[in-house]
Amino acid sequence: MKKKALTKEFFMSIKKTYNRFISICLIVMLGTAFFAGVKAAEPDMQESADIFFDDSKLMDIRVMSTLGLTEDDVTAISAIEGVESAIPVYTYDVLTEKDEKQHVIKLMSETTDMNKITVTEGRMPQKSGECLADWLLEQNYGYKIGDKITISSGDDKTIEDIVNTQTYTITGFGKSSYYLDLTRDSSTIGNGSMSGFLIIPEDNFTLEAFTEIDVLVDGAIALDCYSDAYEDAVDEVTQKIKDIAGDRCEIRYAEVVREAQDAIAEAETEVSDGEQELADAKEELEDGWEQLADAKKEVAEGQMELADAKTQVSDGEKELDAAKDKVADGEKELADAKTQLADGQNQINQAKQQISDGEASIAAYNTELDNGRKQLESAAGQLADAKTGLETLKSGIEQMENALNASQTELDASGEDLKQARTELEANRGQIDGYRTLVATMDSQITALQAQMNLLAGGSKEWQILNTQMQALITQRDAMQVGIAEFDQNEALLLQNEAAYEEGKKALDAKWAELATLKKTYDSGMTDYTAGMSAYEDNLSELNANQAKLNAQKQVLTESKQTIAAKEQELASAQNTIAENEASLDSAKAEIAENEKKLNDAQSEINKNEKKLADAKNEIKENEQKLTDGQAEYDAEYEENHQKLEDAKADIIQAKADLADVDVPEWYVLDRNYITTCVAYAQDSERIGNIGNVFPVIFFLVAALVSLTTMTRMVEEERVQIGTLKALGYRKSSIAAKYVMYAFLATMLGGTIGTLIGQIIFPAVIMNAYKIAYVTLTDFVTPIHLKYSLISMIAAVVSTTAATLAACYKELLAAPAELMRPAAPKIGKRVFLERITFIWKHLNFSNKAAVRNLFRYKKRLFMTVLGIGGCMGLLLVGFGVKDSIMTIGDRQYNFIHTYQVKMTLADADTDEEKQEVLDSVLKEPTTKAAMLSHESTIDACCGSQWRKEAKHVFVHPIRRG
């Protein structure tokens, strides 16, 4: 019965102190939500990354070699126990240009079973010359699908030794699980920083060996990649790969050496064959030059004999030529005379024809001028008639416009009068409406007075008073009705006038429109008239000018006829002289023909001998040209091939030296801990977990303080009830259980809600914030972690129940009689501030009481200070973290890395070359300071624990600029 009553009292207490119960729930919910949520963020982030890595089949191990890797290496690694699959991969850093800026791009061969690419736009490459680009190239440099990227080598290899296609077309953009954030790998070419990657078909690579082999560990996909079990599984396979690395490196070294030795032997054979070919060509040229000298000697003797025969024929030809010259001169003079005679006759005939044509043209032109003059006279008459009509139209338009202006003025005045009348009418409308109301009221009053009078005796005093009132009302009513009737009559008249005004306005507007049409007609006619007059005057001027030209041509024809008659007489005299000269020339031609036949016979014999000599000369010339060409070809080939042979000999010597320097290759077996973004992501998740170890302590402390304050006040309020229960025989544990269960239920309720909400909201918020940095990782999971739920619940229960027990302890030790009496107030004491009189005496009564209560109730003081201090600490931590992060960039680039430009020295090998580059930079007027530095990548360790993490180390001397 006691337990049942106490239980009932327990639930009644919750109901009566509902706000107090909720406050404990809320503070516990806040503390558990923060702890469980922040702590769960670490495994949630890692699990999300693990799911992403598993979906994309990110490699577990990457094997690289200083001399490349072969298919046999892939087979050997695939045969290792624990290896699920191994695939060879080509990668190479190249250069490209965009907007006159050079960028470093990593070429990667396409893989389907490992390191899958998430295509964000477009598609994967399907044929040679296509590529899928890093999405950062689209975001940062504006590349688009369909753009072409031309690459070039950044080291001593030619681009043909790397790939067989130099230009690629972008078919899509994608993200790789190898790069979770916005950073990319460093590079040994260009500016040292990679801008993005390109995925191209494997067939496009022409490298002699694979650059790496990616490995998936059997069973690793089922493990959390950030767990020790995953590390152990990967380390075991890593060690097995390292165990076979020595033998595989020896085999690869033997292959490389054997291939190099075979290439050197082949090059030596080619050099020996080339030297022998040059020697044979030289001997063949020397024999040809000797045969050519003998042929030239025989031709010289034949030329001497032929020269004597030519001398005799030449003398006869000179005599014949002299005679021919005389005949030719005579024929030329005769031909010139005939030509002049024919030309003269042609000129006369042409002149006669021109005169005939001119007379016909003048007659036709004269007819045209007469017709044109008649047409101009007709046009002048039409223009005069048009001008008369336009002037008549203009006069009518002016009369109509004056009449319309007068009508418009009269209509506007009528409109203003109507507006004034309407304004006055509307101003009186309110008063008339009032009259209408009063008339109705008066009718009612008159009817009422009439009814009253009917009840009274006629002529009585009361009847007379009512009659007087009725007559007065009738008089007023009649007067108002007259005013109303007059108002209605005026309004009707005004409406008639307004309607007439609108009709007049419409009619006037129609007249104005008609006037505008007439004006347009007049303006158009005037324009046509002006254009016609201008054309008439121009045509008249042209007609007069043409008549003057016609008269001048008639005068020229008359003078030409007189000149032709004189020329015909001169031609008849010249024709007689030409006939006499032709008879003398015919006799001289017969004598010359006989002498010319004799010379032709002699010349025919000479020509035969000359042909023989010419054939011999041509043959000599052809052979000499062949020898000359052969000599030039030999000299050119000797110059070219001799230098090539010398270079080949030097290359062979250098190759032998390089081969002697080749060391046994070394394998680098790297796991995911060598992927910078994976390690950075893990570290970020660990930092979030570390935050969950610190900040929730403040929330639990505040929860304990709130519980202590709440339960202390509740115990003090129920002090009498506690004494009564003790007096009734209830045990201390039963009484304490009521308050402990009160706090326990509030804690459990708030803790359950807090852990559920916290593990759903806080990880999602934190991981969404990290999306800014880890843009490739887009999907996150937020499961409920029982471990963190139990820890947060236990911590909250311990905090609140301990505070509750502390609040109940003192009261439970007191006797029932003492508890049933009101608690004695605490004894007041003087505080230290009272001794400082110049401050104390300026405080009013309320402030003095507040100061005394601070030290009188020290527990409340400390709880208030700690609660406010904790909250203030949380606020300052938030702002402090923000300020710390914001100042990192300023400190990094204003105090540590204070440079604005970094140059990568690709060709400067010696210290003198590097110093020369540095001096040239320092000479630039915009350079304030410069220095040489060395950048390298190392593995760093902390104590005895190696951290498999890539670090960039800058080593440089101190230089003052």
Image (cartoon, helix red, strand yellow):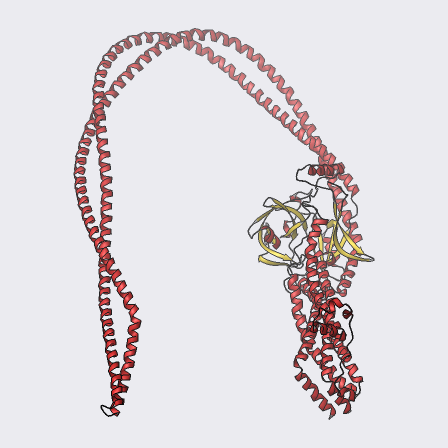
Q: Percent x, y for residue 112?
A: 64, 58
385 to 79, vertically: above or below: above
Name which quarter of the figure residue 906 lies in: top right
Q: Is residue 405 left or right of residue 221?
A: left
Q: Percent x, y for residue 784?
A: 68, 72
| Residue 790 visible in this rendered orientation of the protein | no
Rendered residue at 77%/81% (across/down): 808
Q: Is residue 819 left or right of residue 384?
A: right
Q: Is residue 798 left or right of residue 638?
A: right
Q: Percent x, y for residue 476?
A: 25, 78
Depth check, front residue: 859 or 609: 859
Depth check, front residue: 651 or 110: 110
Depth check, front residue: 425 or 254: 425
Rendered residue at 31%/15% (across/down): 339
Q: Of all residues shown, which one is farthest toward the front?
A: 461
Q: Quadrant of the C terminus?
A: top right
904 to 717, vertically: above or below: above
Q: Quadrant of the N terminus?
A: bottom right
Q: Percent x, y for residue 599?
A: 44, 10
544 to 662, vertically: above or below: above
| Residue 541 visible in this rendered orientation of the protein | yes
